[in-house]
Amino acid sequence: MTETDFIFTQNQSILIPNGSATWKTPSNIALVKYWGKKEPQLPENTSISFTLDACFTITTLEYNLKKDKGKSDFTFEIYFEDEKKEDFKPKIQKFFERIEKYVPFLKDYNFVINSRNSFPHSSGIASSASGMSALALCIMSIEKELNPSISDEYFNKKASFLARLGSGSACRSIEGELIVWGEHKKIKESSDLFGVKFPYKLHKKFKNYHDTILLVDEVEKQVSSTIGHQLMHSHPFAKQRFLQANENISKISEALQNGDIKSFVEIVESEALTLHAMMMTSNPYFILMKPNTLKIINKIWEFRKLTNANVCFTLDAGANVHVLFPENEKEVVNKFIVNELVQFCQENHYICDRIGIGAKRLSI
Ligand code: PMV
């Protein structure tokens, strides 16, 4: 599919005066990371993520047809957890400008956006993936009203396509359980434009995989991912990094199909550390890990050596640690987390999450 396949052609005979749509959309955690992009929000390398389950956003979009349909600028109000948020407006305005070409009906409506997260706002968990994908799905629900003939497959692809234009990783938050974003010769149907489901059979060892998120630092990160992506343009190791990520996609694809958890662990941890190594070697350089991030990593390595458990970590663009482990080891790893790792979390905060199946419409 190409970009032009996503341009909406208005059916003049259908006019929806008002309505609302509510979507519950999960966050995701990348196993092979996306770090570096080109215009318009296209990834420099392929990434793959687990869709999460307990960390989600619920967004309701109310829409009312304007009297001066299509003529004025976008009009919308945003509420986050019942509080009006003027400071969220520029991001949404920019998102609407980017996607207008594909959903031109946006200017026909007055919108009220109401959003809430299942995780604390100041948890250091990025809400852009779940937030942008929820909004993209709400907008697609309007498109579906205007054009009921679109297929479910097109609906999901276009939702992912739109979400990508809001925040790259958001395109991986529409479906589950594993999503690939970025064209790759080993992944059938993969595309730079939207996320696709991992097209091969996932080995049963990875079913119900756990991700316990240790909240090491619950403050907003000092360097945004927008800046981080930009710094990859002039990064001395960028070219090599993009090649490495694409090789890791081939390797992890094999491991996920064969149930090779040892290789999975090696790739996932290396990816996490490489992401942070890119940050530490960019110009200007920066560090998002905290002392407790490293303490947790070392504890996990010690525990793995001692017990041979299949537990590993990954990191997002922040200090929090995602602890990944299979379903059949949950008792022993949960005990380890509670007894040895939670002490390094801010106020002992952590979230027990697991691999999920994707977004769900809550309203009819
Ligand atoms: O979606 P963005 O632009 O916030 O970038 C997110 C990048 C990482 O979370 C660090 C990695 C990834 O692939 O999700």
Image (cartoon, rainbow, N blue to C red):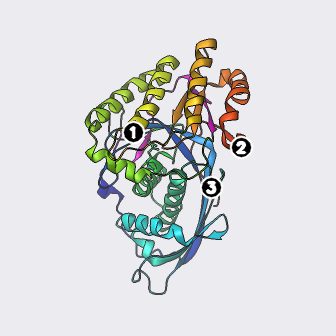
Q: Residue at x 62, y 12 (%)?
A: 306
On whether residue 201 falls in the magenta region, the answer is yes
Task: State the quadrant of the C terminus.
Answer: bottom right
Whole-percent x and y of residue 105? 43, 72
How packed is label 3: few (under 14 Cα within 10 Å), some, or many (20 or more)? Answer: some
Residue under label 2? 347
CA gap, disc 2 and disc 3: 15 Å
Label 3 secondary element: loop
How packed is label 1: few (under 14 Cα within 10 Å), some, or many (20 or more)? Answer: some
Whole-percent x and y of residue 271? 43, 31
In this image, 18 relative to 101: left or right? Answer: right
Give the camera-side residue of 292 and 19: 292
Residue under label 3? 121
Q: Which mark is residue 280?
A: 1
Q: Could you tell me if the residues under marks 1 and 2 are in contact, i.e. CB atoms within 8 Å?
A: no
Give the camera-side residue of 262 and 12: 262
Q: Residue at x 57, y 24 (%)?
A: 298
The total of numbered circles placed on residues is 3
Whole-percent x and y of residue 201? 49, 27
Label 2 secondary element: helix
What segment is highlighted magenta in the picture?
190-214
Mark 1 / mark 2, whichever is N-terminal:
1
Q: Amino acid at mark 3?
A: His
Give the camera-side residue of 96 and 140: 96
